[in-house]
């Protein structure tokens, strides 16, 4: 079983978990939050178990931090929906691992009786193929939205939209690594590699 939950990325001069938006979490839940290696400039990623984070909290996090933020809703380390928001209200979304997303979002027949049997039918594969084509057609706009969002972070690197599109079409798992690579490609400074022990 892979990870299911949220990855929340934002900037803070102190520990991100101290943001007021997380005050409603009890101490036991807070101790279950995994903190990724910080990136230069105060950029931090928190990993929340399923049901702990709500995307409705994103505007409050952006307002508090005064910087863009995003959250990736991850399912079993296979697929993720990333939602980003900046301080001007610009919002974007993109799927990571389109093949799995298309299968999840394929339109089911109204008279469906057994979902397991449906997944093994030519009709399901046709529906998933149609959904994949729809999602793929949205990738240029998704990538452009991500670039606009990252530009509001005042980072000194100009991301290349073509590289972002390529990444949004990749099938890398675990999808958490793909999320980290997306942040790299958007120009956010990479976390320093830990120094080897002498």
Image (spheres, rainbow, N blue to C red):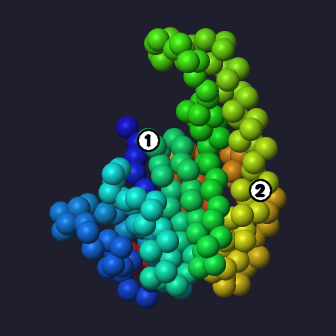
* Residue 128 percent coordinates (x, y): 66, 27
Q: Between residues 119 and 58, which one lies in front from this camera angle?
A: 58
User: Residue 191, can we see it?
Assistant: no
Q: Which residue is mark 2?
A: 141
45, above or below 134, in the image = below
Q: Quadrant of residue 109?
A: top right
Task: State the SS at label 1.
Answer: loop
The residue positioned farthest toward the bottom in the image shown? 13
| Residue drawn 61% across the image and 29% down it | 106
Q: Between residues 9 and 64, which one lies in front from this camera angle?
A: 64
User: Residue 112, can we see it?
Assistant: yes
Q: Mark 1: few, some, or many residues within 10 Å (few <14, many ≥20)?
A: some
Q: Quadrant of the C terminus?
A: bottom left
* Residue 12 percent coordinates (x, y): 45, 83
Q: Quadrant of the N terminus?
A: top left
Q: Mark 2: few, some, or many residues within 10 Å (few <14, many ≥20)?
A: some
* Residue 133 percent coordinates (x, y): 76, 35
| Residue drawn 51% across the image and 41% down it | 78
80, above or below 20, in the image = above
Q: How many marks?
A: 2
Task: State the SS at label 2.
Answer: helix
Q: Which residue is mark 1?
A: 76
Residue 134 as seen in the image, left or right of residue 55:
right
Of badges 1 and 2, nearer the viewer stands: 2
Q: Quadrant of residue 103?
A: top right
Disc on the earlier residue, 1 or 2: 1
| Residue drawn 37% across the image and 68% down it | 35
């Amino acid at each position: 079983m892979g990870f299911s939950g949220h990855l929340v990325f934002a900037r803070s001069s102190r520990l991100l978990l101290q943001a007021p938006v997380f005050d409603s979490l009890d101490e036991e839940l807070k101790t279950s939050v995994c903190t990724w290696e910080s990136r230069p400039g105060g950029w931090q990623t928190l990993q929340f178990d399923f049901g702990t984070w709500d995307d409705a909290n994103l505007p409050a996090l952006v307002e508090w931090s005064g910087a863009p933020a995003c959250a990736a809703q991850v399912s079993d380390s296979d697929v993720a929906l990333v939602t980003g928001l900046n301080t001007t209200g610009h919002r974007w979304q993109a799927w990571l691992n389109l093949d799995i997303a298309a299968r999840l979002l394929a339109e089911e027949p109204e008279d469906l009786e057994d979902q397991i049997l449906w997944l093994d039918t030519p009709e399901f594969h046709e529906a998933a193929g149609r959904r994949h084509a729809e999602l793929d057609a949205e990738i240029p706009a998704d990538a452009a939205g991500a670039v606009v969002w990252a530009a509001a972070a005042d980072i000194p690197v100009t991301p290349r939209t073509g590289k972002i599109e390529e990444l949004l079409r990749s099938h890398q798992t675990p999808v958490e690594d793909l999320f980290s690579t997306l942040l790299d490609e958007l120009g956010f400074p990479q976390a320093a590699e830990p120094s080897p022990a002498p």
